[in-house]
Image (spheres, rainbow, N blue to C red):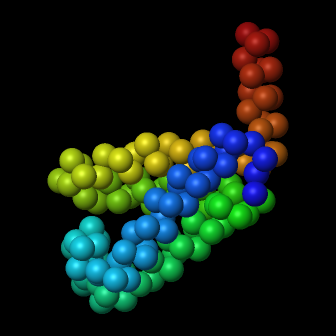
Amino acid sequence: MPKDKVELLLRLGVAFAFIYPAVSAFFNPFAWVGYFPLFLGDYVSLGFALYFVGLFEIAIAFWILFGKNIFVPSTLATIFLIAIVAFNWSQMDVLFRDLPIAAMSLALALKYRPASAQISQSQDKLAYRKY
């Protein structure tokens, strides 16, 4: 667990946002299956997809909550949340809250981005200062 209180709050917030729908979908799948894109039903059973996504959400949540290097799960969480909003734009009145959660997971991803990305970014700043 992180010692930084702000990071801990970010991790708890993102993890809760992933654990709650997974657990709720297990007990009430009909409340959640409507968020899947319609075309997905052409390829797999929506019930199977719901359980698979629930497992994915729980794995992401625990990895973000207890992991040391959380760049990968935070990036996946960001992409996942943005995809939910993009594929369900007509439900933006409900899903608008996913965007701030995506920003939280993006903040965690940026904090834990690989060192090579941080070095290249600082080199870009130095190159910019030369001109």
Residue 100, x across and y down, in percent:
43, 43
**Left or right: 125 with respect to 11?**
right
Instruction: State which quarter of the image contains the N terminus.
Output: bottom right
Residue occupying image coordinates x 29% and y 81%: 29
**Residue sitting farthest toward the left:** 90
Residue 11, x across and y down, in percent:
61, 53
Residue occupying image coordinates x 49% and y 68%: 19
Residue occupying image coordinates x 72% and y 48%: 112
Residue 39, x across and y down, in percent:
24, 75
**Left or right: 54 with respect to 31?**
right
**Left or right: 28 with respect to 81?**
left
Q: Is residue 53 above or below residue 20?
A: below
Residue occupying image coordinates x 57% and y 66%: 61
Instruction: State which quarter of the image contains the C terminus.
Output: top right
Q: Is residue 120 above or below residue 33?
A: above
Of residue 34 and residue 118, the one placed in the foreground of this image is: 34
Regarding residue 33, the answer to whether it shows in the image is yes
